[in-house]
Amino acid sequence: MVKKILILILVVLNIGCDQISKDIVRKNVSPNDYIQVVNDNFILTNVENTGAMLGFGQDLSPILKIIFLQAIPVLVLLILLFRILQKTDLNRKLIIAFAFVIGGGIGNLIDRIAYGSVTDFFQIKFGLLKTGIFNMADVSVTTGVLLILFLSFRDKKLTL
């Protein structure tokens, strides 16, 4: 029971961090502003993404957006959450990784459902390396996925 509560707390913390940061940006950064936080390497902006990662799917019809950007992700995230809450023998690091993926995914879903778009606001530039514009939910999902991949390659017996 304690494990389940800790998983839910971690998911909620990821959602909260994402939603609070987006709310601050929506209230304090004008759309498409370009604020240099650390020289020209770390930029704060305010962009509404009507698609998924890097704008994928933004040209879909409204019904397809609901199916592919809301309904299917809700189903997948609920199944993942149910699975990690039910498993008793999961590696602790794997549980943390999935909690990050689920929390970040829910954070972006909240935006899609409530606003019809996702607020993105960070960009990093180092020489030729330039990220797309992203948010804290994206950081959570990416961190979780990278940890899952790392753990999977390190321990071939991991399963969900």
Image (spheres, rainbow, N blue to C red):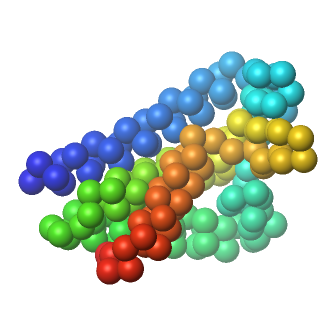
Judge left or right: residue 84 versus residue 44: left
Judge left or right: residue 135 versus residue 2: right
Q: Quadrant of the N terminus?
A: bottom left
Identity of the residue drawn at 76% across and 57% down: 54
x, y percentage for residue 106? 46, 53
Judge left or right: residue 32 versus residue 75: right
Judge left or right: residue 14 versus residue 129: left
Identity of the residue drawn at 48% across and 64% down: 150
Q: Can residue 64 be seen by looking at this rendering?
A: yes
Q: How many numbered discs sit on the rendered protein?
A: 0
Direction right: furthest residue = 128
Depth order, front residue of 26/10: 10
Give the answer, above or below, for where 115 lies relative to 54.
Answer: above
Give the answer, above or below, for where 37 lies relative to 140.
Answer: above
x, y percentage for residue 27? 65, 22
Q: Quadrant of the C terminus?
A: bottom left
x, y percentage for residue 104? 49, 50
Q: Can residue 106 be seen by looking at this rendering?
A: no
Depth order, front residue of 47/39: 39
x, y percentage for residue 145? 51, 62
Q: Quadrant of residue 89?
A: bottom left
Identity of the residue drawn at 82% across and 39% down: 125
Depth order, front residue of 41/108: 41
Direction front: furthest residue = 154
Identity of the residue drawn at 24% across and 67% down: 90
